[in-house]
Amino acid sequence: MAYDPAQLPGLEARLDAELRRADPEAILARAVEVFPQGLALVSSFGAESAVLLHMAAQVRPDLPILFLDTGMLFAQTLDYRRALTARLGLTDVRDLRPAFADLATADPRSDLWRTSTDACCEVRKVLPLERGLEGFGAWITGRKRFHGGDRLSLPVVESAEGRIKFNPLANWDKSDLDAYMERHALPPHPLVEHGYPSLGCWPCTQPVEAGQDVRAGRWAGSEKTECGIHVARTPGAVNDLGGDI
């Protein structure tokens, strides 16, 4: 069954009911079947990204991979992106970067993260992804329920901003990921061994202590738990990209 835009209302509920207990590989294969065109995988090339990228490479190595290069990533993440792309044979990895005009207006000194992490994420992640997703009717994420917070109730298939979102790893926990990495001899992100179980931009990511939540090092000390790309947009929430209203 290929995707028909007229079927979007209710499509996510039907697919979620069908796939909610399916293996991640089966979910990916179904996503490619329903969306033979207009499907992308959004990856951070972070601590757990190798699992989903490896699965995608087995299903469709030319699947578009959208990578948000914010300009503030760890150098190790950029190195890992290049190495893993070559290792897995991914043929269509697209680097999404913030627009020069947006940076010139909102963050000319590259220090917006000090005063408004929400506005910084908006200009460096949310807006580039919006532009990068143009022309795609569906996308794949690497989110999992065990990460906690709003992700505890994460469905396998959902809709947002007029697109279908597939979350193939929603049901998996850390042991599933570790077992898959070992089974396929996948290289870990180089910062994992230094206490970074979840990785974002260097100003807003810290190592975590043993026993802490996986995402405890993201925006530590604040109430922020998501960068914004998985949060419903509220028009006017950020004023001219320069700060919270």
Image (cartoon, helix red, strand yellow):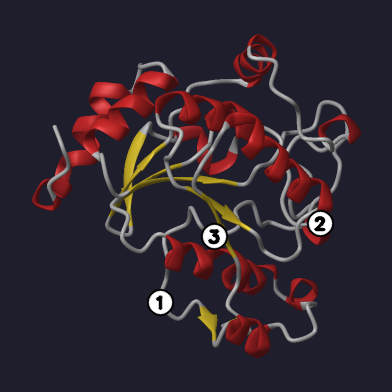
Whether residue 158 is visible to the viewer of this picture, yes or no, is yes
Q: Residue at x 68, y 56 (%)?
A: 223
Question: Could you say where residue 157 lies in the image, as x and y percent from the top left?
Answer: 33, 36
- Image quadrant where residue 52 sits: top right
Q: Residue at x 65, y 11 (%)?
A: 179
Relative depth, front residue between 19 and 233: 19
Q: Taking 115 as reference, is 55 above or below it?
A: above
Where residue 154 sits, quadrant-wise, is top left
Q: Position of 93 compared to 178: left or right?
A: left
Label 3 is placed on what type of residue?
Gly
Report crowding for label 1: few under 14, some 14 to 19, many 20 or more residues within 10 A (C-alpha): few
If you read the primary sequence from the N terminus, does the residue marked by circle 2 or circle 1 appear first?
2
Pointer 3 residue: 228
Q: Which residue is mark 2?
A: 202
Between 79 and 125, the one nearer to me in the picture: 79
* Disc marking residue 235: 1
Q: Quadrant of the N terminus?
A: top left
- Circles 1 and 3: CB atoms closer than 8 Å: no
